[in-house]
Image: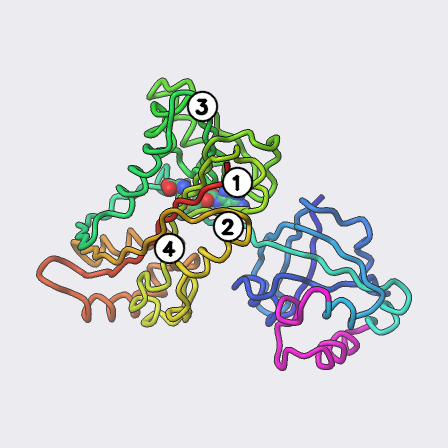
Amino acid sequence: MKYLLDLNDRPFKAIKLGTKKVEGRTPTVWDKTPYNNLQKGDLIHFVNNLTKEEMDVEVIFIHHYPDVRMMLEKEGVENVLSGEPKTIEYGIESYNSFDGYKDGIVKNGIYAIGIKTIQQDFYDKVAKKFGSYLNSAKYIQEFPKGSPEEIFKEKLIEVSGKEKTVLDSGCGDGRFTLLIAPYFKKVIGNDTSKLMLNAAKKLQKEKKIKNVEFIEVDSHMLNFPDEYFNVIYARRSPMELNSFYKMIKKGGYLLYIGIGEKDTKDLKQIFGRGQNYGKWDEPVLEQFKNEFEKAGFKVVFAKGYEYNEYYASYEDLNTFLQGVPIFEDYDSEKDKIYLWQYVKKFQTEKGINLPRHRIVFVVKKHS
Ligand SMILES: C[S@@+](CC[C@H](N)C(=O)[O-])C[C@H]1O[C@@H](n2cnc3c(N)ncnc32)[C@H](O)[C@@H]1O
């Protein structure tokens, strides 16, 4: 089911940023949404009351509470509240101040809706524009400590085998999926972007590769039997660690290449926004290590890679930025002023320098 809901500007922005993960709602005289019927997997189409901006999110859980206090205690104030101070008392006060909520909550309790933003629109847009996850920007790369992409591929081939089944979580346009297919018996690539999957299937046909299956399923909703895969990997795409752990065979592997906290930091600073903005001092390598271990995996390889890209021209960097989620709302016209500022500051003899940061993990399920 898809529900249409209005939302104030501040919570809208917090949900978009990913800092607000739970929306508390109750039916009122003016809001007849049947929150009691909401289910995991439903979609909510939020409209920003102020800006009229729209955003689709997916419902990942529904918890029902008798009152706001219990909701905030159980779900965590930091996940529910978008305003300050993030305290239970302030939370109760603000929910009670919404039109009809005080009475509505006494009558119906309150529904904590766990939500996840859907990046699908962005990737569909990219696939529409460039035909795949590849664009024509010209650049060179310099790796002082080796190429993380190459190292990831080597590590994946090390754990591959002609009798093994592998999952590519968030496979995108399938170029990499098809590249490693010869090393495995079977490869399943899942993604939420229909257009990326179309590009993947087209390439598969062209390459006449038979042992790959592309499926349109959210990585958080995969439902393969326990111990189905020898290996799962994700390349800058989402993981659902507890379910991945279950789906991997004993002694099997999970590989991940992701974005480090310092990636394109100067660019984001000049733009004043961007993916993981401002989190430069929160080491992603450590955070992932903890998450993998918490899910039961043993970390066998974990390394960060800082390297440089040099873009041939302003236009090349502009093209690049249209095809990546560094700024999902990147606008060639509106952002001109920032991009010129960056180009002036980071122009070198080799081109416009863009420092990158990646992390690579190989983790193992116990035998
Ligand atoms: C940065 S791209 C990487 C694509 C591919 N892994 C690669 O290396 O070229 C991220 C991909 O993850 C997909 N994605 C985002 N959220 C997803 C989700 N919840 N489930 C499955 N795929 C998702 C996007 O549609 C996109 O294709």
Where is mark 2, residue-wise?
119
* Contact (Cβ within 8 Å) of mark 4 with mark 1: no
- For the N terminus, give its image quadrant: top right
The answer to whether residue 227 is left or right of residue 209 is right
Q: Separation of disc 2 and disc 1 at Cα?
A: 8 Å
Q: Is residue 172 magenta?
A: no
User: Along the polypeptide, which appears first: circle 4 or circle 2?
Assistant: 2
Does residue 349 sit above or below 92 in this rendering?
above
Residue drawn 35% across and 36% down? 156
Q: Amino acid at mark 4?
A: Ile
Q: Is residue 93 magenta?
A: yes
The answer to whether residue 31 is left or right of residue 352 is right
**Secondary-structure class at tag 1:** loop
Q: Amino acid at mark 1?
A: Thr
**Secondary-structure class at tag 2:** loop
* Contact (Cβ within 8 Å) of mark 2 with mark 1: yes
Where is mark 4, residue-wise?
259
Residue 193 horizontal/vertical position (percent): 49, 40
Q: State the scheme by which the image is colored.
A: rainbow
Where is mark 3, residue-wise?
186
Q: Amino acid at mark 3?
A: Lys
* Contact (Cβ within 8 Å) of mark 4 with mark 3: no
Under 8 Å from ligand 1: the CB of mark 2?
yes
